[in-house]
Image (cartoon, rainbow, N blue to C red):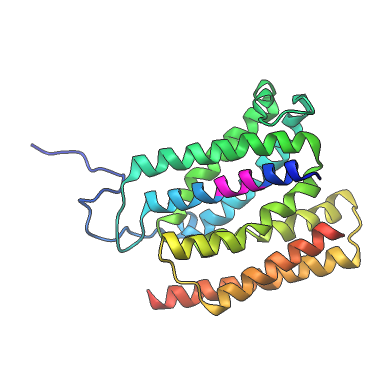
Amino acid sequence: MATAPNPLPSAADESPPTRGKGFLNPYVQIGLSTLLTGLSHILFKKGASGISPNAWFGYEALSSGWTWLGIVATITSLFSWLYALRFVPLNIAYNLTSILQVAVPLGGCLFFGEKIGWLRGAGIGLVFIGVVLISQAAAEAEEKL
Amino acid sequence: MTPLHLLQVFLSESSAIAGQILFKHAMGDSKRNSPFWPSLAMGIGCMAFSYFVWQALLQKFQLSYLFPFDGLNRVLLVASASIFLKEKATPRLWAGVILISSGVLLVSGS
């Protein structure tokens, strides 16, 4: 009797997973996951306004629609993230998401006219160089595969 | 920020790192496979705990003030991935991580 293929990894699978191209490239998925995570941070912040000031656990935010939009963004980003982790080491994938530390302040500067002082500019520059180094480390790891 | 708030930040960040380690463990890698559902479920539990503690912090502090703390856990994550997942951390990777953490510190101090 024919059985349906199991899409989830299991101990019975011996062959390595097939890596997708284009939209399914794991690095594209890391980028998508990073964007959605950044969006969820903003949505969670909007949803956090209903929490009492002395709360240790912010479950009251669940009464806000913004929080639920943030949860949807988080769950969507989780699918991309889990897919990417199938192919990319965690220490490289996670650190590539640091580009958000550069993109968010630059976005604030470009779209909202926020000022970037020299200290913040230097910090953004260091983060950017760090991400470039990690990208090179990722390329090294790819060559060895 | 009081020591209690710092404890909240530490709880949120450390449980997020535990969640990431469990996610990677669930997905395995190109050479080995791991138990999927138990690791995924525990990972989601850790991330949910981290999320609720983070939400409570967001009520008290500005996002731009809290966000840099999210960047500081990268050193801890690379160390944890080396210990628990046996991932290789090259000198170039460590240099990148230290630069990112230093940059995040500068941004948070600005």
On screen, residue B88 versus residue B93, left or right, reads: left
Quadrant assignment, res B83:
bottom left
Return the residue nearer the eye: B18 or B4: B4
Please report the residue visible at 67 percent of the width from the left and 39 percent of the height from the top. B54
Q: Is residue A118 above or below residue A109?
A: below
Magenta-drawn stretch contains B14: yes
Q: x, y (%) of residue B14?
A: 58, 49
For the N terminus of chain A, give its image quadrant.
Answer: top left
Quadrant assignment, res B52:
top right
Please report the residue visible at 43 percent of the width from the left and 67 percent of the height from the top. B87
On screen, residue A55 versus residue A108, left or right, reads: left
Please report the residue visible at 81 percent of the width from the left and 57 percent of the height from the top. B108
Q: Is residue A137 above or below residue A116?
A: below
What's the magenta bit mostly, secondary-structure-wise? Answer: helix
Q: x, y (%) of residue A41?
A: 69, 42
Q: Is residue A58 above or below residue B32?
A: above
Q: Residue furthest left?
A: A1
Which residues make up the magenta segment? B10-16
Magenta-drawn stretch contains A113: no
Return the residue nearer the eye: A105 or A49: A49
Can residue A88 be seen in this snapshot? no
Q: Is residue A32 above or below residue A88?
A: above
Return the residue nearer the eye: A127 or A87: A127
Q: x, y (%) of residue A141?
A: 45, 74
Q: Residue furthest top?
A: A63
For the C terminus of chain A, give its image quadrant.
Answer: bottom left
Q: x, y (%) of residue B19?
A: 50, 46
Please report the residue visible at 64 percent of the width from the left and 24 percent of the height from the top. A62
User: How many numbered marks does the figure carry?
Assistant: 0
On screen, residue A48 versus residue B22, left or right, reads: right
Can residue B15 be seen in this snapshot? yes
